[in-house]
Amino acid sequence: DVAQMDLGATSGCLIDHAGVLSCWGENGEGQLGRGELGRHTTPLEVYPATDAGGDWLDVALGETHTCATGVRTDGSPRVWCWGGNADLQLGVWEHATSGRPVVLPVSMPGLGQGYPYVSSRFRHTCLNGADGPVCWGWNAYNQIDQSPNQHRTPSIASVPASARVETSAWRTC
């Protein structure tokens, strides 16, 4: 019973109606979120959405990374990313890849009480934050609305707060 699904360049993930996230496909940079490398041809559950239990809400896959939103059992929303991070697409400064979900800082700008929708493609990610879309990662074509050729950690995009953003390899709309 699939509630939500996304496909990346060489892998895919789905969230079932119970809030369980499973991924499959290529896994050379840990983009399946299981703490290991290697291809999996059948969906395998990603480590729990939350460090304290809870449900996954949305998932989006880039070229070699995955980001997802979830709600902890205490009701607080969180954003996790894992996989390749050569262009800061995990939203953290460390250039290391992470095969396990890395929770993004709660103090990220614009992250209020609701951000169920996330969009990733190629090497950048955006999510709908309380103060407007928040984007990070590869920015060679100014697709995250900042100085081109700069890799960015999360920051609020210059679009209306009510806008829902979608990403492609070289654009954000």
Image (cartoon, grey):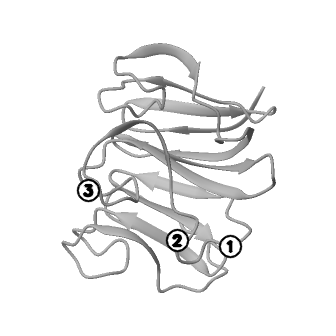
For label 2, count other residues whose C-alpha is less than 10 Å away and answer few (under 14), some (14-19) or many (20+): some
Residue at image position (40%, 46%) is: 62
Q: Earlier in the sequence, mark 2 or mark 3?
A: 3
For residue 25, which quarter of the picture? top left
- Residues 104 and 39: in front is 104
Dot 2 falls on a residue whose secondary structure is loop
Q: Position of residue 28 (x, y in %)?
A: 29, 27
- Disc number at residue 7? none
Q: Total of numbered circles in the picture?
A: 3
Image: 133 above or below 89: below
The residue beneath circle 2 is: 108
- Amino acid at the residue labelled 2: Met
Q: CA gap, disc 2 to disc 1?
A: 9 Å
Dot 3 falls on a residue whose secondary structure is loop
The residue beneath circle 1 is: 112
- Residues 166 and 115: in front is 115
Q: Position of residue 1 (x, y in %)?
A: 78, 25
Residue 173 visible to an observer of this rendering? no
Q: CA gap, disc 3 to disc 1?
A: 25 Å
For label 3, count other residues whose C-alpha is less than 10 Å away and answer few (under 14), some (14-19) or many (20+): many
Q: CA gap, disc 2 to disc 3?
A: 18 Å
Q: Position of residue 27 (x, y in %)?
A: 36, 26
Residue at image position (44%, 15%) is: 40
Image: 91 above or below 101: below
- Amino acid at the residue labelled 1: Gly
- As drawn, the residue found furthest toward the left would be 149
For residue 164, which quarter of the picture? bottom right
- For discs 2 and 3, the disc positioned in front in the rendered view: 2
- Residues 1 and 84: in front is 84
The residue beneath circle 3 is: 87
- As drawn, the residue found furthest toward the top would be 41
Image: 169 above or below 171: above
